[in-house]
């Protein structure tokens, strides 16, 4: 992250802290989809809930998976957490979501400008592109940078009552995730389905 | 284009009694309560896509990439809603990563309809080459797949394959061969 080039006047926050703040606000069994790598590691570390889904691959598909959940359960609010590097792999998904206008989907982008988990290489967008501007340009008018932690919480509160899809950009530091998700895809999927009320445990 | 055009023009009769390939696919999807249909378009699939859009039972929409569509129907399945993805051979070629890291390990009954380009009269060398990658990729993951060539076998194969995908929680690819659809011929 090139601090000098940044003119958004947004604070650099921490992924685990911001994720924990989101989880603490959830009261209605909201679904949360965690993108590949550190994004879902910190979701796991913030405290497992049955309504959490952790991706172990398919980089870039957190928003698409969340869109599917949102379309299947329009009465449930769905949050998706994605890294900036992941999102760059699937920018078209933003337009798909903008076109479908699910009112219950909130996207959160954790933007540190680097592929932290592979050795902190900068992304191609790091010093030239603005994720929130890309989202707005993709048709997601309700997209904003969180200025600081309080502003993030305010944007989450707004999202809870939103009537259109919304996106929150969060500038984060270069720290790795705090925990490590248990890599058991079948159990992750099955427990998520229990959490969404789709299935009962055996 | 003759066969495909004849079938396209017959879509005016689309409905429960429609025995065109695309009429059978639509009714089979509906009978199996598959209502979410993301797709990346293909010329041969056009009558099916048009009729899906026209039927309010279905939520039918284009995605920018095929793997995006796979992510959407995977999420929808976990949320209790069934979907299927429509694509062309070249689109399937973009899916190895999402199949191996999402659909297969998470045991998601991903239902794919693939319009087969690259064979039986292909005019684009690139299409004919990418077509050759499809079955090796499916076989490398031991995925169920059927190539449908006959109208009289379509309903049985599609209906049974969808039910098997759901009950065994495993992906299936239904490859719509030019012998069934007429395919796309010459530069058009």
Image: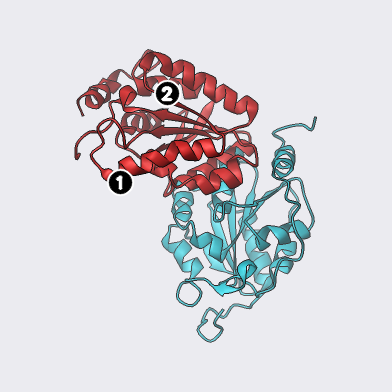
Q: Colour of chain B?
A: red
The correct choice, above or below, for A139 with respect to B140 in the image is: below
Above-or-below relation of B98 to B87: below
> Which quadrant of the structure image shows residue B74?
top right
Cα distance between the residues tagged 1 and 2: 28 Å
Instruction: Pick whichever of labels 1 and 2 is earlier in the sequence.
Output: 2
The residue where tag 2 is placed is B25
Label 2: chain letter: B
Which residue is label 1 attached to? Answer: B126
| Label ID, residue B178 | none
Chain letter tied to cyan: A
Q: Are marks 1 and 2 on the same chain?
A: yes
Classify residue A72 by image quadrant.
top right
Q: Nearer the viewer, residue B133 or A20?
A: B133
Q: Quadrant of the N terminus of chain B?
A: top left
Label 2 crowd (10 A; few <14 / some 14-19 / many >=20): many
């Amino acid at each position: 992250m090139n601090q000098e080039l940044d003119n958004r006047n947004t604070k650099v926050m921490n992924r685990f802290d911001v994720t924990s703040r989101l989880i603490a606000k959830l009261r209605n069994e909201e679904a949360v989809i965690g993108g590949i790598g550190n994004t879902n590691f910190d979701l796991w570390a913030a405290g497992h809930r049955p309504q959490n889904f952790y991706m172990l691959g398919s980089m870039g598909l957190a928003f698409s998976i969340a869109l599917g959940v949102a379309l299947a359960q329009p009465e449930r609010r769905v949050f998706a957490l994605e890294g900036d590097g992941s999102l760059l792999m699937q920018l078209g998904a933003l337009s798909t979501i903008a076109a479908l206008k699910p009112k219950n989907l909130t996207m959160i982008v954790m933007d540190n400008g680097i592929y932290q988990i592979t050795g902190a290489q900068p992304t191609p967008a790091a010093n030239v592109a603005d994720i929130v501007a890309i989202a707005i340009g993709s048709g997601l008018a309700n997209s904003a940078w969180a200025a600081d932690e309080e502003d993030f919480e305010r944007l989450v509160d707004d999202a809870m009552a939103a009537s259109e899809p919304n996106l929150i950009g969060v500038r984060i530091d270069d720290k790795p995730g705090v925990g490590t998700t248990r890599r058991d895809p079948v159990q992750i999927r099955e427990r998520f389905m229990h959490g969404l009320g789709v299935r009962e445990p055996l | 284009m003759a066969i495909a055009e004849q079938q396209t023009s017959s879509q005016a009769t689309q409905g429960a009694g429609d025995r065109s390939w695309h009429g059978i696919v639509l009714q089979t999807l509906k009978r199996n309560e598959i209502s979410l249909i993301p797709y990346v378009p293909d010329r041969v699939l056009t009558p099916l896509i048009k009729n899906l859009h026209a039927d309010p039972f279905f939520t039918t929409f284009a995605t920018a990439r095929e793997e995006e569509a796979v992510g959407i129907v995977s999420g929808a399945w976990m949320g209790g809603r069934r979907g299927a993805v429509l694509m062309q051979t070249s689109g399937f070629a973009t899916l190895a990563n999402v199949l191996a890291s999402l659909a297969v390990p998470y045991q998601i009954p991903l239902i794919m309809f693939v319009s087969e380009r690259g064979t039986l009269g292909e005019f684009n060398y690139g299409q004919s080459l990418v077509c050759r990658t499809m079955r090796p990729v499916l076989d490398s993951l031991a995925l169920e797949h059927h190539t449908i060539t006959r109208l009289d076998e379509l309903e049985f194969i599609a209906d049974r394959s969808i039910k098997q995908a759901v009950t065994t929680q495993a992906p299936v690819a239904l490859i719509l061969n030019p012998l069934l659809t007429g395919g796309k011929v010459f530069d058009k």
